[in-house]
Image (cartoon, helix red, strand yellow):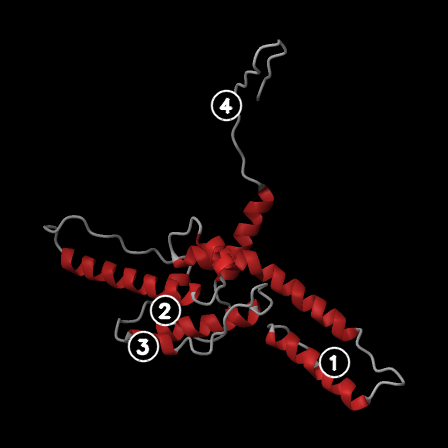
Amino acid sequence: MSSVSQSGEEPVFSLNTETPIQSDPISTRIRATATAKATSNSPFIAPVEPPSNQQTNTQRTDHFAQVPKLAPKGTNFLAFKEQWHIAIAAAGYSHLFDTSFIPPTNPKDPEAPGYIAELTIFQSYTRLESQARSLLTARLDDRLMCKVMKGSTRVLDIWVKLVEQLQVKSEIAISDMKADWEQHTCGPKVNLIDFLAEDQEMVDEIENAGGEVSDSEF
């Protein structure tokens, strides 16, 4: 623990190095939750292993045509997340967003058996990693991009930080939108056609953000 001199001299601080430094349990829990939610829970079948590198860059990029740009406040994150998982599965990037995936390493010894094969695998991995990182960051505004890029070494790091930053915010935003919709009532002097149009617009906004409005809620 720290101690401070009680004399008139400059305070002297001493650190007891025997006391272990513990991480913030709340931050640790948030990080663990974000890591778990970063993995797709889509019911669709995803590739079991990284596909062969047969698609061209243009073909891969085409799969992301329907992935929207992430809203500045992340209000469309849940919908964005679903579209993103569909795109990376089609483009062959899913393994890069799998927390259990272990990236290949750059072989050091050119004389070692299998060096060329290992180098080819590593180069393929780094190429896919760069492409995925470019596609993801292109859909973020500058402020958010700088925030999630800081300290990241893989595209998975960026993705986990996005989930950590926006998953809860998006869920809260949807909850607020649903609360506003539930309070939306048609008064005696309100035009019914206008009311129904506004009501449908609110429902569309909820669903576009990734929320659901069941028939029983109407």
Name which of mark 3 and mark 1 comes first in the sequence.
Answer: 3
Q: Name the residue furthest left.
A: 111
Q: Name the residue furthest right.
A: 188
Q: Name the residue furthest top.
A: 7
Residue in view at x 60 percent, y 67 percent: 75
Q: Classify residue 215 by image quadrant.
A: bottom right
| Secondary structure category for the residue under label 3 | helix
Q: Residues within 10 Å of mark 3 (few under 14, many from 20)?
A: few
Task: Please tell me how many numbered marks the rendered image carries.
Answer: 4
Q: Nearer the viewer, mark 4 or mark 2?
A: 4
Between residue 61 and residue 157, name the one nearer to us: 61
Location of residue 185 in the rendering, given as x and y in whole percent from the top left corner: 82, 79
Q: Nearer the viewer, mark 3 or mark 4?
A: 3
Q: Amino acid at mark 3?
A: Thr
Name which of mark 2 and mark 3 comes first in the sequence.
Answer: 2
Tell me the tag on residue 18: 4
Name which of mark 4 and mark 2 comes first in the sequence.
Answer: 4
Residue labelled with disc 2: 48
Q: Amino acid at mark 2?
A: Val
Residue 114 visible somewhere in the drawing: no
Q: State whether residue 125 is above or below residue 32.
A: below
Q: Quadrant of the C terminus?
A: bottom right
Residue in view at x 15 percent, y 55 percent: 115
Tell me the tag on residue 58: 3
| Secondary structure category for the residue under label 4 | loop
Q: State whether residue 23 is above or below residue 145.
A: above
Q: Nearer the viewer, mark 2 or mark 3?
A: 3
Residue labelled with disc 1: 216
Q: Quadrant of the N terminus?
A: top right
Between residue 152 and residue 103, name the one nearer to us: 152
Q: Amino acid at mark 4?
A: Glu
